[in-house]
Amino acid sequence: MTLTLEDRLAISELIVLHGHLVDDGELDRLDELFTPDAVYDVTDFGQDPLTGLPAIREAALALGAGNPVAHHVTNVVVREAADGGVRARSKGLGVRTDGSCGSVTYDDTLVRTPDGWRISHRTVTARRVPLNGVTRSG
């Protein structure tokens, strides 16, 4: 598949829409972001992967006040994968009610649906170590 400029723009806008919908509490609109059977992999946070929109919505509701008050998604890179699929990688910054911040990387698999691009699989990885642990050797 060859991605057009329009595809890349639509995918980038889809990915950044996530922060707006979640921060606004519009969890009933997750179908605008994800396929109905999407996998939301949060194993890096000690949880099982979430499968399907109801599970993703319920996990956000269960976290309640533990959710960040602001999700900022940036540094979106869209690429065509060797298997012909579409992948995107982006950075997420979450701001908590106490002002503390956290950083994650989103690794997404995307599919084109009749309603536009949707995320079919997302892996969320926490950024905990500067330079991903790379140090000077010598």
Image (spheres, rainbow, N blue to C red):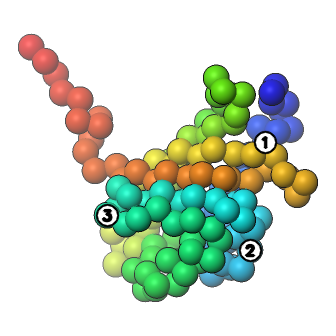
In this rendering, the answer to whether 97 lies above or below 31 is: below
Going by the numbered disc 1, the residue's amino acid type is Leu
Residue 89: x percent and y percent?
Answer: 56, 41
Q: Which mark is residue 29?
A: 2
Could you tell me if residue 75 is visible in this image? Answer: no
Q: Nearer the viewer, mark 2 or mark 3?
A: 3
Q: Earlier in the sequence, mark 2 or mark 3?
A: 2
Q: Is residue 34 left or right of residue 71?
A: right
User: For the residue labelled by badge 2, is the local secondary structure a helix, a strand or a loop?
Assistant: helix
Q: Which mark is residue 22?
A: none
Q: Is residue 108 left or right of residue 113?
A: left
Q: Which residue is mark 1?
A: 9
Could you tell me if residue 61 is visible in this image? Answer: yes
Q: Nearer the viewer, residue 71 or 15?
A: 15
Report the residue at 38% width, 58% height from top.
43
Q: Dot 1 surroundings within 10 Å: few (below 14), some, or many (20 or more)?
A: few
Mark 1–mark 3 distance (CA, rounded to whole Å): 33 Å
| Cβ–Cβ under 8 Å for marks 1 and 3 | no
In this rendering, the answer to whether 45 lies above or below 129 is: below
Q: Which residue lies most toward the left here?
A: 138
